Image (cartoon, rainbow, N blue to C red):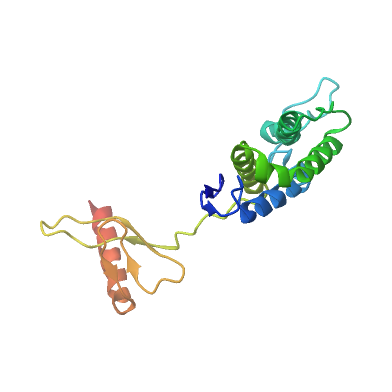
Amino acid sequence: MNLCLLCEKPDPTGSYLCVVCTQATEVRVQSLPALYRGLAPFLRPAGGVGQGRSGKGGPAPLPVNEDILDLRGPGGIVGAAERWLADVRRDRGHTVATTSGGIEGRLQAAVTGLLANMSWIAVSWPNAGYFAKDIRDLVDSLRTMIAPTPAVSRGQRLGHCPATDPSGVLCGSVLHLKPGEKAVRCEWCGTAYPPYVWAQLKTWIDEDARAGNAA
């Protein structure tokens, strides 16, 4: 029994990619044209402004996000898809087609070619794992650029932790009340402040703040 080269789980069929990973890879390959188009709005950096004036006296053009430009260029998304398709065709003994036309058309052609060979890739190609991992990493990276994962909120800032250690040293770490939490907990010393002590907690925080200012 082989292990799937992507998820590394036993595969009773003896294929290089299990059924689940084959289907997931197909979906990722299919998504490449849409992700390519989805990058277009990000060619201009957020908040970009023209730099001075152009040689003709008008405003200089807005800067271009070079990372996005590279991904949408010949060596980016389309380059990756075409290289994998060329490897598949070469290993199958097929003629490697010469690329031509616009980037978006070439990408769609490469995607169509890869999907047409997915059954062979999953069952018969020793490089299936490298291919599936590369496509997964590429798609994950593109999705992150288009729809970044929102930062986790640290919650409401309350002030500095008033807890002291046995020697009397003040903790002083910043306290936050995180969304959904029912108690304030210091991330540094671990002291917890349940709701029934919050009024007193505020008094302690204010007293420490005044003492610090006086010092």
Q: Residue at x 61, y 50 (%)?
A: 148
* Left or right: residue 18 compared with residue 91: left
* Frontmost residue, 131 versus 46: 131
As drawn, 203 above or below 104: below
Q: Is residue 169 left or right of residue 78?
A: left
Q: Residue at x 82, y 19 (%)?
A: 55
Of all residues, the one furthest to the right in this rendering is 101
Kindly tell me whether residue 64 is visible in this rendering.
Answer: no
Judging depth in this view, the residue of 54 and 66 nearest the camera is 66
Quarter assignment of residue 72: top right
Residue 145 image offset from top left, x and y in percent: 65, 45
- For the question of whether residue 182 can be seen, the reply is yes
Task: Report the front residue among 160 and 141.
Answer: 141
Q: Position of residue 8 (x, y in %)?
A: 51, 48
The residue lying furthest to the bottom in this view is: 196
Picture quadrant where residue 157 is located: bottom left
Note whether 73 is above or below 113 in the view shown. Answer: above
Q: Position of residue 110 (x, y in %)?
A: 79, 38
148 lies above or below 128: below
